[in-house]
Image: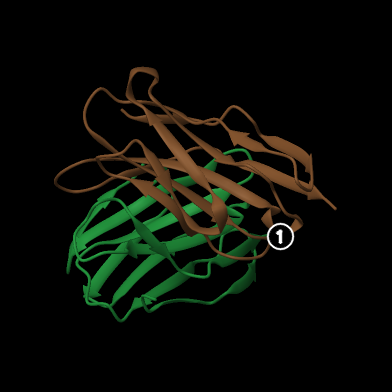
Chain colours: A green, B brown
Amino acid sequence: DAGITQSPRHKVTETGTPVTLRCHQTENHRYMYWYRQDPGHGLRLIHYSYGVKDTDKGEVSDGYSVSRSKTEDFLLTLESATSSQTSVYFCAIPRTGGNTGELFFGEGSRLTVL
Amino acid sequence: AQSVSQHNHHVILSEAASLELGCNYSYGGTVNLFWYVQYPGQHLQLLLKYFSGDPLVKGIKGFEAEFIKSKFSFNLRKPSVQWSDTAEYFCAVSHSGGYQKVTFGTGTKLQVIP
């Protein structure tokens, strides 16, 4: 299976604090994605990247920023966390060499904002 | 924008019962279709996929899905469910060609009672 790891896996923080989640891949893939999963909403795309320093917004990008300075790392930052950002965050990369939409997901990062 | 509808939010079945989960999408062009499964506490895993060809696709663990283009549907089926199929199931759609932005349905929680 593809190598993709997320850190931290669990985090509890307070409203107003900055939080950074890291996604690391060993597949050298050009595309990387950040999703959030919430009950009743499924998975929603926050941001995606199509190369080093190339990123774009997804459908729920407000309150989030991303950076990709290396192919293997895609960082998701909450500049000032809010309770509405309590969620499980999944990083994903394309499962195949192409980009068919078939995704491989990381283990997830559960974030609780108090 | 493309969207995906999963009509059943929570399904409870007894072991050996047959399963059918509905999925409808809205997009007029060529699509790639997926079903993902998420077992309790785990990340999403690919169950099956459709890109082209035979509209009846078979996946892992005895699951299958049928693409009906005229109905914009991609329903998931299994003739006889097992307790181990208890999980949440997500339908997903991506455009064919170019960058793939994947849209997920809201998910269906399946509970199989022994």
Residue name at image x 51 percent, y 60 percent: A89
Q: Position of residue A112 (x, y in %)?
A: 65, 62
Q: Position of residue A17 (x, y in %)?
A: 55, 65
Q: Is residue B104 visible?
A: yes
Callout 1: helix, strand or loop? helix
- Which residue in the protein does label 1 denote? B84
Residue that protrudes farthest toward the left in the picture: B98
Q: Is residue A80 visible?
A: no
Q: Amino acid at mark 1?
A: Ser
Along the line of sight, which residue is nearer the eye, A26 or B79?
A: B79
10 Å crowding of disc 1: few (<14), some (14-19), many (20+): few
Is B87 displayed left or right of A45 in the figure? Answer: right
Give the letter of the chain under mark 1. B
Q: Where is residue B21, by image quadrant? A: top right
Q: Where is residue B11, by image quadrant? A: top right
Residue name at image x 54 percent, y 49 percent: B63
Q: Quadrant of the C terminus of chain A?
A: bottom right
**Is A41 drawn above or below residue A18 in the view shown?**
above
